[in-house]
Image (tube, rainbow, N blue to C red):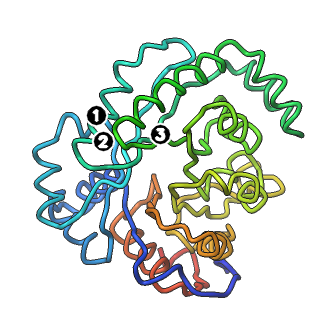
Amino acid sequence: MHTGNSDTGRGISEEMKISFFYDHVLEAAAQSGKTTGEVMALCRQAGITGIEINGQCLQENQDRIRRELEENKMQISCIYQQYEFGQNTDLTAARETVLLAEKFHSQRVLAIPGFLTEQDAHDLVSRADTFAHTEQYMDAHPEIQRMKETLTQMCSFAAEHQVSVVLEDYDNFTAPFARTWQLLWFMKNVPGLRYALDIGNFAYSDEDVLAAYRVLQPYIVHVHCKDRGRERARENGRYRKGLAAVPFGYGYLPTAKVLELLKEQQYDGFYAIEHFGAPDQLKYMKKSAEYLQSGKKFRLFPAAF
């Protein structure tokens, strides 16, 4: 039997702000045959009041998305966009994303600033045991330095428009912001940069999300509610037991404990439901929203999904 979270306790509060990735809205529409507007209405009925969206998607579909937001009394919780700051320090695209956030009254832009070569990523990960070792490598790496300098400029520009730039723990080996000490280095070295806690992505790097939380807690302004399901066929580790997409609260991660810590911190930002690759996005969305709002723990067979 698949066992969900064993923690006990309640959710955050009845007033918590929940959002849903617009990519999931598009997937749900394709899976169900509904329009994106109909899917948005179902999200709103489930208690979801925001969407998180890719900047390019929003730029290309502004009128339709604005209409869907207004019809359902929803807002944009965060706009995310990938850049290549390690190679290209031009800020034109980043400034456009910030101005788009201002236009849509979103306070968060999640920047994915670039990636390293496989070899450099291996070298960086080999120094992941302590912050001092990680810091020594990142201080001397030219591409990471360019990421730092360009993010600093982006954060300064964003602050002028009442927008915060955030960095998440990213589930890619070549991202120099996938692990705890890497993220702490960016927080310490980029004035104004803040942190988006992705609850499910530390499992990718086989790190303990609770240990990471204790280190990065002062910088948290946004949360991705991602859980992970067990997979026997995958090469796992101490904390990674699989990376399968499951509704939030139905996997093996200590989601209830993280929610409890956020409540103690008096976190009042959005909780963005995320499960890329879900075979039934509407069903997963409803289950995730229910879990967040009720705080109930679940013990389910995989077939329940």
Look at mark 2 in the image and give the residue it sits on.
101
250 relative position to 79: left or right? right
Name the image quarter holding the N terminus. bottom right
- Horizontal side, residue 131 vs residue 241: left or right: right
Mark 2 crowd level (few <14, some 14–19, many ≥20, 10 Å Cα): many
**Residue 223: x %, y % from top left:** 52, 58
The answer to whether mark 2 and mark 3 are in CB contact below 8 A is: no
How far is mark 2 from mark 3, CA to CA? Answer: 11 Å
Q: Do labels 2 and 1 touch, CB within 8 Å? A: yes
Tag 3 secondary structure: strand
Provide the residue designation for mark 3: 165
| Amino acid on which disc 1 is placed | Leu
- Mark 3 / mark 1, whichever is N-terminal: 1
Q: Quadrant of residue 158?
A: top left
Disc 2 from disc 1: Cα separation: 5 Å
Residue drawn at (50%, 55%), measured in percent from left and top? 222
| Residue 139 as seen in the image, left or right of residue 100 | right
Q: Is residue 280 above or below residue 61?
A: below
- Residue placed furthest toward the front: 160
- Disc 1 is placed on an element classified as helix
Around disc 1, counting alpha carbons within 10 Å, would you say few (fewer than 14), some (14 to 19), or many (20 or more)?
A: some
Q: Amino acid at mark 2?
A: Ala
Q: Is residue 103 left or right of residue 284?
A: left
Q: Compare marks 2 and 3 and give the one earlier in the sequence.
A: 2
Residue under pointer 1: 99
Q: 271 or 99: nearer the eye?
A: 99
Give the vertical position of 205 relative to 20 (above or below): above
Image coordinates of residue 210 in percent, x first then y, are 74, 62
Residue 178 at what x, y percent from top left? Answer: 67, 40
Q: Nearer the viewer, residue 16 or 227?
A: 16
- List x then y, in percent, for residue 237: 81, 53
